[in-house]
Amino acid sequence: MLRYTVIFIILAIVAGIFGFGGIAAGAASIAKVLFFIFLVLFVISLISGRKRI
């Protein structure tokens, strides 16, 4: 699951660069969505990692 969180954060950063740089107007909203998905997956990874120990 950590692999997916890394992929989502990279996609969010790339979409943010394109969107906030003015290259693509719709990419800013995509970046926001991907960022929140990354946060949720990150929290889930932290919680599930603590339960295994």
Image (tube, rainbow, N blue to C red):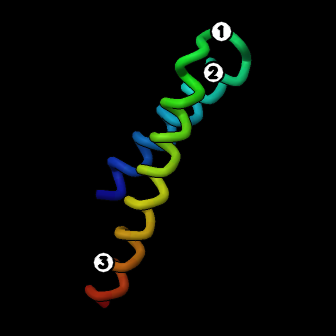
Q: Tell whether label 2 touches label 1 (CB within 8 Å).
A: yes
Foreground residue among 51 and 16: 16
How crowded pointer 1 is (Cα within 10 Å; few <14, some 14-19, many 20+) is rated as few
Element under disc 1? loop
On screen, residue 18 above or below 30: above
Give the quadrant of the C terminus: bottom left
Determine the image quadrant of residue 24: top right
Element under disc 3? helix
Q: CA distance from mark 2 to mark 3?
A: 33 Å
x and y percent of residue 15 in the render?
Answer: 55, 26
- At a point 54% along the width and 22% down the height, the residue shown is 27
**Horizontal side of residue 1 vs 46, given as left or right:** left
Indicate the amino acid at tag 1: Ile
Q: Which label number is shown at residue 19?
A: 2
Q: CA distance from mark 1 to mark 2?
A: 6 Å
On screen, residue 46 above or below 42: below
Q: Which label number is shown at residue 23?
A: 1
Indicate the amino acid at tag 2: Gly
Identify the residue position indicated by label 3 in the image.
48
Sequence-wise, the earlier of marks 1 and 3 is 1
- At a point 43% along the width and 69% down the height, the residue shown is 43
x and y percent of residue 36 in the render?
Answer: 49, 51
Q: Which label number is shown at residue 35?
A: none
x and y percent of residue 16 in the render?
Answer: 62, 29
Indicate the amino acid at tag 3: Ser
Residue 14 visible in the picture: no
Name the residue furthest right.
Answer: 21
